[in-house]
Amino acid sequence: MSIINYVNKEVQFKIVYYGAALCGKTTNLAYIHGHITDTNKGELVSLATAADRTLFFDFLPLNALVIKGFRTRFQLYTVPGQVIYNATRQLVLRSVDGVVFVTDSHWDKMQENVESFHNLYDNLVLQGMDMDRIPYVLQYNKRDVPRLAPVHYLEYILNNRPVRVPSYQAVATTGQGVFATLNAISRLLLRKFIRETEETAAAGQVRAPAPAATALSGIAAGTRR
Ligand SMILES: Nc1nc2c(ncn2[C@@H]2O[C@H](COP(=O)(O)OP(=O)(O)O)[C@@H](O)[C@H]2O)c(=O)[nH]1
Ligand SMILES: [Mg+2]
C-alpha cells in the first residue's frame, strides 16, 4: 500500500526487485543509480557479503514527478535470491506496492526462475496479497548470454497467469531494458494511485495510510540517504 503524506503532499511507492540468486537484481539498481541525476536520487545502500552477494537487500530512493499535486517518491529494493534467505525476503516484501520479477535467460536457470516465481507467489499470499492484484512486470535479463532461452518460452513458463503482464528483455550490465522495466512498473503504480485517489475522492473520503506502512519506515530508517 503506497504511503501518502497529506501534509507534505507526498506519495511513496515501494518497488521490490525479486528473482533467483545472481539473476541481475543488484545490477539493475546499480545501473539506475548511475544514470539518474543527483537531485533525483538518494544513496544506493547495498548490504552485501564479501562475495558480493546480497545478504539483506539493496535500497535506492528516487524522486519523480508531481502527480495530482503529490510529489512521488519510489523506493527500490532487491531481495537476497539464495533459497535459505526466505525470512529476509518476506521482510523486504512487507508493504510492497509493485514487483519487478527479474529472470536469468540462460537455459540452465529455468528451474531456479520458476522456483523463485513460486516463492514470490507464496510470500505474497502469506502477507494477504495476491499476484492478481499486485502490479508487477517481468524482466528477462541476461539476453547477451550463450544458451539463451527464447522469449516465447520464458513467456510460456512465467507469463501464464490469467492476465498477461508487461515483459521486457534486458542486459542489466549495459543498461539495456533497465529503464524500460522501471518505467513500466512506475506507470502501473501511478495509474493505480490515480484511480484509487479518484475513487476515494468520489466517495468523499480521505485515504489514510495503512498501518502496515510503518514496516517500510522501519526498514528504511536504518539506511543512510
Ligand atoms: N552477461 C550478463 N551478466 C549479467 C547481467 N546482469 C547481471 N549480470 C552479472 O550477473 C552477476 C550477478 O548479478 P547481481 O546483480 O549481483 O545478481 P543478484 O543476485 O540478482 O543481485 C554479476 O556478475 C553481474 O555482473 C546481464 O544482463 N548479462
Ligand atoms: Mg543482489
Image: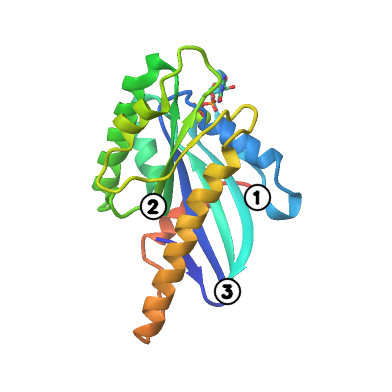
Q: In this rendering, does residue 88 appear at all? A: yes
Quarter of the image where the N terminus is located: bottom left
Q: Is residue 99 above or below residue 149?
A: below
Eye-nearest disc, 2 or 3: 2
Marks 3 and 1 in Cβ contact (< 8 Å): no
Q: Residue at x 39, y 18 (%)?
A: 109
Q: Which residue is outermost to the right? A: 38
In the displayed structure image, the side of residue 137 where residue 164 appears, left or right: left
User: Is 206 above or below relative to 144?
Assistant: below
* Residue of label 1: 225
Answer with mark 3 or mark 1, whichever residue precedes in sequence: 3
Q: Residues within 10 Å of mark 3 (few under 14, many from 20)?
A: some
Q: Give the image location of residue 164, x and y in percent.
A: 33, 45
Q: Position of residue 204 (x, y in %)?
A: 37, 87
Q: Residues within 10 Å of mark 1 (few under 14, many from 20)?
A: few
Measured in 3D between alpha carbons, the distance from the residue under mark 2 to the one under mark 1, in whole angstroms, is 26 Å
* Front one among 123 and 48: 123
Residue, x 41% and y 51% (percent of image)?
96
Q: Quadrant of residue 208?
A: bottom left
Give the label on residue 135, or none. 2
Q: Where does the image place residue 129, in percent across and percent down from the top left? A: 28, 52
In the image as oriented, which residue stretches furthest toward the bottom? 204
Disc 2 from disc 3: Cα separation: 23 Å
* Secondary-structure class at tag 3: loop
Dot 3 amino acid type? Lys
User: Is 74 placed above or below 32 here?
Assistant: below
Which quarter holds ligand 1?
top right
Q: Which residue is mark 3?
A: 9
Residue in the foreground of this view, choosing between 25 and 58? 25
Q: Residues within 10 Å of mark 2 (few under 14, many from 20)?
A: many
Earlier in the chain: of badge 2 and badge 3, it is: 3
Residue type (three-letter) at the residue carrying disc 2:
Pro
